Amino acid sequence: MSPEKALLVSCDNDSGDTIKYDIRLQKEPLLTFTDETTYPLAENSLLRMSCTAADGVPKPQIRWEFSNGRTFNTSISQLSSDSVKSVMTAKMTRQDHGVGVKCFAVQNNDSVQTHDFGMLDVQFNPVKSDIVFSTKPSLVHGEKLKAQCTVDSNPPAAISYEIAYKVKGAN
């Protein structure tokens, strides 16, 4: 029986009635995957992964998911009457750091096989720094200055403090 056909069974009873049964076979596909990405991932680099769903009845479809709901490009290749391959590409952003990526094989609108690629580790340079002072803007000699600096980057940026002061009235 080919994957696209069903088995039709007929039963006749003594009164001449015929009951027909349409039996369809469902076979979960074998899901294989490849990660073709160059690591470490950096902001603006290309993530490229592929999933192949083979020997599925009915023919499977492949769906991708980023845990942050982001969209991406995919291309689908028909390998045979019961096998497909999907290649997913996405340009990485700093918002993709820590995001999960999954590939699903789908049959009859149900996910039957899943591969979890794990969480993305996207490296990006510091862009924004913020400094917060917890003291008044004008200090008297001997008072403590408290400051906190935060920087958004991966890996975390090294933060250093430099204090320069000028004396009022000096040339």
Image (spheres, grey):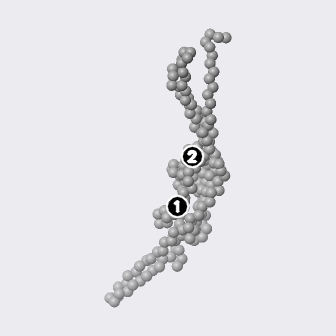
First reached walking from the N terminus: tag 2 or tag 1 = 2
Mark seen at residue 97: 2
Tag 1 secondary structure: strand
Of all residues shown, which one is farthest toward the left? 15
| Location of residue 48 in the rendering, given as x and y in whole percent from the top left corner | 62, 54
**Could you tell me the amino acid type at mark 2?**
His
* Location of residue 76 by image quarter: bottom right
Identify the residue shown where x is 55% and y is 17%: 142
Label 2 to label 1: alpha-carbon separation: 21 Å
Identify the residue shown where x is 65% and y is 48%: 40
Mark seen at residue 96: none
Question: Is 30 placed above or below 140 here?
Answer: below
| Location of residue 68 in the rendering, given as x and y in whole percent from the top left corner | 51, 49
| Location of residue 137 in the rendering, given as x and y in whole percent from the top left corner | 53, 20
**Could you tell me the amino acid type at mark 1?**
Thr
* Residue that mark 1 sits on: 114
Tag 2 secondary structure: loop
Contact, mark 2 vs mark 1 (Cβ under 8 Å): no
